[in-house]
Amino acid sequence: MNEMKLNVLICSGCDIGKKLDIEKLKGIAEREFKGEVSISSELCNSPELLRNVHGNVVIAACSPREKQANFSVENDSILERVNLREGIIWSHQSNEAMQSMAEDYLRMGINSVMRKSLATLIDEEISKDILVIGGGITGITAALEAAKANYNVFLVEKEGKLGGKVAEYGRILPVKSPYRDTVDASSFINERIARLKEDSRIKTFLSSSIGSISGQPGMFDVQIKSPSSEAIIRVGSIIVATGWKPYDASKIKKYKYGLNPDIITTLELEKLLKDGNSFANQKTFAFVLCAGQRDDQNLPYCSSVCCAASLKEALQIRERVRDSKVFIFYKDMRALGVYEEFYKKAQEDSGIFLAKADVDEISWNDGEPGMELKLNGGFLDFGTDIRVDKVVLATGMISSEFGMYNVKEEHPENGPLSYSHLNPYKLSDGATATSGEHILNLRYRQGPELPTLMDGFPDSHYVCFPYESRRTGIFAAGTARSPSNVATCEIDAKGAALKAIQTVELADRGLIIGPPKVGEEDHLTISLQRCTQCRRCTEECPFGAIDEDAKTFPLYNPLRCRDCGICMGACPVQAISFKQYSVDILHSMIKSIKIPEEDDKLRIVVFACENDAYPALDIASRERMKYSEEVRIIPVRCLGSVNSVLVADSLSEGIDGLLFLGCKYGSDYQCHFVRGSELESQRLKALKETLDNLALEPERLRIEQIELSDWSKVGNIIDGFVESVRKFGPNPFRGL
Amino acid sequence: MSTSNPVSRQRIEVDLNFVNEVTRRGGGDVKKCMQCSECSVVCPLSPSESPFPRKEMLWTQWGLKDKLMADPDIWMCHNCEDCSKECPRNAKPGSVLGALRSMVIETYSWPRAISRAFSKKAFLALFALVPVVLMIVFFLATGIRVPNGGPIYFSSLVPYNYLDTAGIIVGAYAILALLYGCFRYYRTLSKQKKGKMNAVIAAILTLKDVILHTWFSVCGSNRNRYYAHILIFYGFCVLLLATFTGALEIHVFGFSHALLGEPQNIIGNIGTVLILPGLLIAIINRTTSKVPKEDTYFDWFFLILLLLIVCTGFVMELLRLDGISLAYWTYMIHLILVFMLVAYFPYSKFAHLAYRFFALTYLTSIGRRPAV
């Protein structure tokens, strides 16, 4: 309990006053909690009322998602919103039931706010410098962009020169309207390298690698290994622009790569073209697109650039070799976005022949020039062969982070990976970073590299947060993040540079850095007296925010934290709590719920994820969709923050059932914290035993996956659960 | 794996010139096709199994001439241009199919040298000169001169015996050349797949389709073309009937010369009343159409020649009734035009009548018909 004064402001506008007995609510706040109560018929339009309150402030009005600008409080106060409008009067009908609901919600809000304490800011010496790893087009662009915004940049490049893959190309795909003309790669990259060298804010380390990275956003200590020296620098954020590597073409057996010198990859052809090769007497060329791509045996994904890149090379061959014929066999022609224009240009060329077809077999007679291609399927499906002089395989792009560290094991329902890791890295070995092939060498308890998703690309969320990795303050951009062309790499670099700048500025203010709770200021504390060194928090934190000390006690890195509370949900001894979010606070809210005396009335707690499920409920209310009056909804930061002890306690205290509304989980998860809802579902399964001991039916707990777009179904889901619990009758522990 | 494949494997030889040839005939946008199949989806005539014109577009891009010259599907198309209207790439599949049809006519018609030359605009003057020269030779040889004054009888310029003899010779040549071409085409087609139906029965069913314009009536949005075609087709048939009626009158019933009010004249006028609006609709349709489409020499030769024949025929009739001797000159032009119609029938768009009939007969025999 904090010692601050309790202020309760109740709004009677928007028909709240007509549907609810406001005076009765006022009485509860005054009598039970000794609070000072003000009532306004239009609270959102009464700034003077808010200006005069300090301490614990409870606003009973509309949804906490509404009118946040009107209802903000000073730094010396803690705000709690009680949702009377969307949560009660818009979504329910019976006056009597709504009144008891409002009384419960008010008590829950007051009990919650009185257990919160004022947040304290992190006050540390913060570096605003930015580290860029990789000196290709992405790294160079990111460095230039960050420097342009007046941030110091360190750029580390493994090779002895800058330019990366683009410096190896002859020409690159069009970068500006009308997207029909290719661009000379050397002049394109050299112009950027020259600008980089001129920029005094950028310090470049060539032939260098990262020895180790430790610390957290704003305070990353980076060891840079150069041939003759070693430097330790402190940076605020990191951009990983380490690019791509080609997929090994010899793994695609049917194309016989390596057995005939005239079977080459697009990257090899690019070098031939750059070197001015004129292909001797070779006149006919066949491009095999999607070579080993979108293929379960090899790369399951589309590299997105090979179609346009192959067209580019085909046009160059046509320019260079008179009377040449270029055949392009595709699975689907995917000249993404504006490159449709470039595709049209290539189509116009009379010597370029495009068709959807599978190349089934490549054969040749030793000593004779030329090869025979057996085509099948697609548009040339009448059993066709074609003779060509050269075969070009468009093999895919894999991230430089591919195979270093993969969180695939978290999604076992997809079965084993269909491709093999280059260097499988085991999670349990993560305490110390290894040197050698690794790029980042993070000294994180969870491993030395960025966790990657299914296809070996580092990302933290499929949809919402581009450039974010699962290591706060470290951003992936360009082909290290996803297959991209040069123009996309530049866009990526700019986006990642903005993220890096945002990171150092937020770190400087001591605020939460990663989405979705960017800019919040609530950090957690771990009670080491209680801790049993079980390591669950250090293992389950989706962002690797908690390291371990020598005795395996948790070491919290506040600026890596994203405020989700998954560690709080994981801790078996409830040693982890936030200033304004804890098991105790949630428990006090549940205890505030008045259990009805009648046996035919149930009380069910719904934990609703504040990212998708709670907004979905708001939308449903706005559409005046009704749901059961027997539920009490508690918004949570993430389902993963709900501790099993809290669930068991609620049941033993007479709550009839608990419904968990969270984000979709699995390999195509939508959880904003990667796997909170999935972890909670696992914890609930483990709780079944506890329920057996209590002689309670396991069906009293249910987890449902809700997307925002499911708002029209959410009411039915709640009602369905209430009815299924009704079959078992009220909780036998009621009133005990 | 290929051994189990019943389709014999064929080597693709890409013919770069083929695309140029198609371009010359109005299919120049074929390279723009991206194989999305929108054309095959919108086409009301395209069967669900192995639909056209998507595959024809690809084969044309790849210059697969042998496949295209043995592809009966191009004749299923009745050129409503729905495909060209909906094509997202403006590749004009309708125009490409038109070009392919004209190439089939050129490829199979006999003798090849004439059909090849006829497809080129540059030779038009030469082909027009042939009947002019023949006519000059005729007048020089017979000593007949254009009569001056008196009632106008065309037989006094070209006696019926000469006219009919010439008609029979040129007509027989045209029919034989055309049938020979169609026979070669039909043989090529029927090598591919054995018909389920007797060819004669298929031909009778196809004839019924032609008379009722069954396929054409399925054709999508462009109804004006349907009406134009039906008017031209029946107008042409009626005019043909008028010609034979004239021959009957003279050789069987012993009329000395054509008179107003006799059957030939009445039938001829009915034919004119049908064909003239048909031609005008077709021409207006072509010139005002918003659908992206290539108008070719091949198409215009057909329309303009028919229009000129009908117009000169109509004008010379009026002049004759008024007793104006200009009628003889108009008659001479009319005869030259009719010669061009008949003698070049196997090489011009007129031949589509026969080629389409044979292709549709083949398609009917293998049971390939639009889902009507």
Image: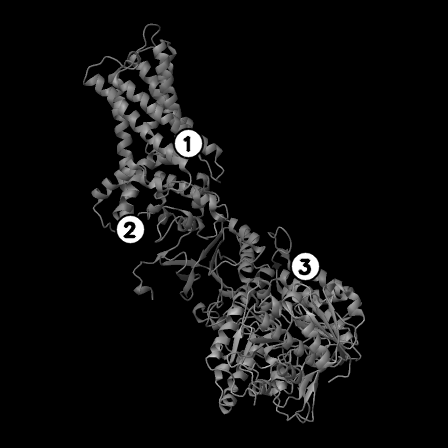
Q: Amino acid at mark 1?
A: Ala
Q: Nearer the viewer, residue B3 or A114?
A: A114
Residue found 66% across the figure and 60% down from its top = A186
Task: Describe residue B42's horizontal placement relative to residue A680 as left or right.
Answer: left
Please, which chain is the residue tagged with disc 2 on?
B
Residue at disc 1, secondary structure = helix
Distance of mark 3 from mark 1, alpha carbons? 56 Å
Q: Nearer the viewer, residue B238 or B73?
A: B238
The tag on residue B192 is: 2
The tag on residue B282 is: 1
Q: Amino acid at mark 2?
A: Gln
Residue at disc 2, secondary structure = helix
In the rendered image, residue A311, in percent from the top left (x then y), is placed at: 54, 57
Please, which chain is the residue tagged with disc 3 on?
A
Q: Amino acid at mark 3?
A: Phe
* Rendering quarter of residue A456: bottom right
In the rendered image, residue A382, in percent from the top left (x then y), is placed at: 36, 57
Task: Describe residue B73's horizontal placement relative to residue A153 as left or right.
Answer: left
The tag on residue A125 is: none
Residue at disc 3, secondary structure = helix
Q: Nearer the viewer, residue B348 or B132?
A: B348
Q: Residues within 10 Å of mark 3 (few under 14, many from 20)?
A: some
In the rendered image, residue B24, in percent from the top left (x then y), is placed at: 45, 39
* Rendering quarter of residue A119: bottom right
Distance of mark 2 from mark 3, alpha carbons? 55 Å
In the rendered image, residue A162, in percent from the top left (x then y), is placed at: 69, 68
**Residue wearing tag 3:** A188
